[in-house]
Image (spheres, rainbow, N blue to C red):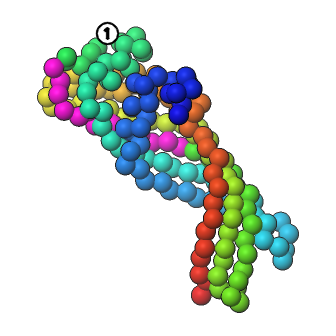
Amino acid sequence: FLTSVGAYDAVVSSVVRSSISNSFVLRTSLGVRPFSGHGFEILGGYTLLTGGGAVATADVLNAILTESGSSVQAPAGLGGDIPLSATLHNVHATLGWRWLLANDHLVIRASVSYLQTLASRIDVKIPASASVLVPYQGMINDQVNAYLAPFFAKYAKAPTLGLSAAVRF
């Protein structure tokens, strides 16, 4: 969607989608119910998102390195996938309502939340087949992060709707 509206190009889209394709999410929240006896809740907290994947060709990596002004390039014939991983540090805020049913054993919760990325880190793993680049792995990661971090900070945010059910014993 962001590529189609011109927010960023296909290269950035490929790296973003690839780096968070196999994701793990950890969310911690603190909240209050300001009105005793009512179901209104206010929550806020931290969300960690990690993911991993790979870009299929060195062309994507080279496009990012070129955009960031690097003279280091992956070999033209480099085949195979280039593994990527991403870690995003986010804050979230939630407004919700809970209903207690079945003698307070069943909890139904509806919510609306907002998630905003504050910091991110992309790690590019240089494959052994690109031995000429291995000594530059740290520099390549720094340049990839310098180029992509503003995109995560600007576009990795989302409103979400939630509906959950839980059983209390």
Rendering coords of residue 132 (x, y %): 17, 20
- Taking depth in this image into account, of 37 and 131 the one nearest to the observer is 37
Residue at position x 32%, y 23% in the image? 61
Question: Mark 1 is on which residue type?
Answer: Ser
Res. 143 visible in picture? yes
* Other residues around mark 1 within 10 Å, as few (<14) / some (14–19) / many (≥20): few
Q: What stretch is highlighted in magenta?
A: 77-89
Residue ranking furthest to the bottom: 103
Residue ranking furthest to the front: 4
Question: Would you name the residue on which mark 1 appears?
Answer: 71
- Dominant SS of magenta comes to strand
Q: What element carries label 1?
A: loop
The relative height of residue 28 versus residue 121 in the rendered view (above or below) is below
Rendering coords of residue 38 (x, y %): 83, 73
Task: Tell whether position 79 is magenta.
Answer: yes
User: Which quadrant would the C terminus be assigned to in this image?
Assistant: bottom right
Res. 135 visible in picture? no
Residue at position x 56%, y 51% in the image? 47
Rendering coords of residue 128 (x, y %): 15, 31
Rendering coords of residue 30 (x, y %): 67, 61
